[in-house]
Amino acid sequence: VFTPEVQKAIIGTDAPITGDFTFSLTDGAETPYTDTAAVTGSGTATFKEITYNEAGTYTYTIHEIVPDDNEKVPGIFTM
């Protein structure tokens, strides 16, 4: 059993300390596994537990889901 996590850090003197940030976790298998997790402000977002039935190497990709311009938190920029 594995419980993936991702951390969001908001830094800078003018950076807001709140805002909702959503992340997506996917794998590259033929039957892809996907999940999302969210965090408000800086902190840790935890995905659902993943149970493995076989030993092996498993690779996942986590990326932040960037909202449309009209939904972005003022002061948060994606580079």
Image (cartoon, rainbow, N blue to C red):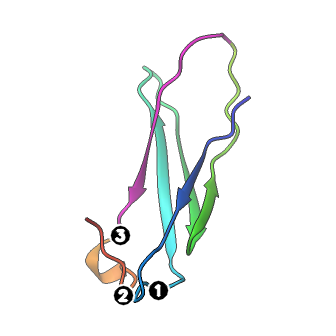
Q: Who's the residue at 35% across and 69% down the image? A: 67
- Furthest residue to the top? 55
Q: Estimate the x, y position of residue 31 in percent, counting from the top left.
A: 47, 24
Residue at image coords 41%, 57%: 64
Q: Which residue is mark 3?
A: 67
Viewer-nearest of labels 3 and 1?
Answer: 1
Could you tell me if the residues under marks 2 and 3 are in contact, i.e. CB atoms within 8 Å?
Answer: no
User: Where are the magenta residues, as a range?
Assistant: 54-67
Q: Give whichever of 51, 79 is nearer the camera.
A: 79
Q: Do labels 2 and 1 touch, CB within 8 Å?
A: yes
- In the foreground, 39 or 16: 16
The N terminus - image quarter: top right
Q: List the single residue furthest toward the front.
A: 13
Task: Give the percent coordinates (x, y) of residue 18.
Answer: 54, 82
User: Is 59 part of what is drawn in magenta?
Assistant: yes
Q: How would you rate the neighbour count of disc 3 (Cα within 10 Å): few for under 14, some for 14-19, many for 20 or more?
A: few
Please give the residue where the numbered disc 2 appears in the rendered image: 74
Q: Are marks 3 and 1 in contact (CB under 8 Å)?
A: no
Give the number of the disc on residue 16: 1
Q: CA distance from mark 2 to mark 3?
A: 12 Å
Residue type at mark 1? Answer: Pro
Neighbours of disc 2 within 10 Å: few (<14), some (14-19), many (20+): few
* Between discs 2 and 1, the one toward the N terminus: 1
